[in-house]
Image (spheres, rainbow, N blue to C red):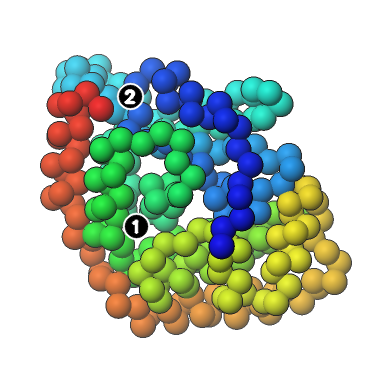
Amino acid sequence: MREPVSLPGWLAEVAGEQPYPLAFATVSGAHLYGFPSVDSDVDLRGVHVLPVGEVAGLRHGPETLDRMWTRDAVEVDLVTHDVAKFCRLLLGRNGYVLEQLLSPLVVASSEVHEELAALAPGCLTRHHAHHYLGFSRTQWRLFSRTLELKPLLYTFRVLATGTHLMRTGELEADLTRLYAYGPAYLPELVAAKREAEHGPAPAALEAVAADVERMTAELELARDSSSLPERATAADALHDLVLRARSAGG
């Protein structure tokens, strides 16, 4: 079972404060991954809908908006993409946007959000494994330099998420639901991360490299044997959805 996540009640007000209508906004980051610390910020991700007048003429509205602020001692990081850019990313084997779209931590939703989520299975391919393999290498290098717990947990999280996706066709971003893919000490790491956002990795984990290597090999094997298709099948449906969302003004 997913443990309750403590999030500010005022997050629901965020959608109405943005310059463009939001098709959705969800919580990503450590809260989604199952190991928010007491001082974690809140990562909001979503989709805004530019009006026709800002995409059809000479002046184009912002495809990406990024805003950070602090309220009641909580730091919030909101990033939204225009619906067309988001759909291009969905079709580009991007695991980030799939996780954002399918996050169960929903702050704002709409019919466009529901349709996008329904089309998500048609965006999945075996090549999403490359996203998770690349992200794991980046986080592992960061851990090797800093010896902080956070990038180590991110390394394990993306390897487990990627392997589960390749084997089952289901996207699960919460590491606490994926312990079976990792070493037995993962719950201890998660407990330590919840106490401090930038704490050091426990000294007893000097042999984690072998576990990371094993999980990397398992993800590569899962990719090679996956029943997921080579190409996305939802491109036409997403194109139609973008047109309808644009004409309706979000």
Label 2: few (<14), some (14–19) or many (≥20) C-alpha neighbours in 10 Å: some
Eyeballing the image, is 133 above or below 86? below
Q: Amino acid at mark 2?
A: Pro
Q: Nearer the viewer, mark 1 or mark 2?
A: 2
Amino acid, disc 1:
Arg
Q: Looking at the picture, how far across and down is residue 207, in whole percent?
A: 77, 77
Q: Position of residue 60 (x, y in %)?
A: 27, 21
Of labels 1 and 2, earlier in sequence is: 2
Element on which disc 1 rests: loop
- Element class at badge 2: loop
Question: Which residue is depicted at the point 25% across and 71% down?
Answer: 229
Given residues 89 and 71, the one toward you in this image is 71
Q: Is residue 60 left or right of residue 172?
A: left
Residue 139 visible in this rendered orientation of the protein:
no
Q: Which quadrant of the structure image shows residue 245?
A: top left
Mark 2 = which residue? 21
Q: Which residue is mark 1?
A: 93
At x 67% / y 30%, what residue is drawn? 74
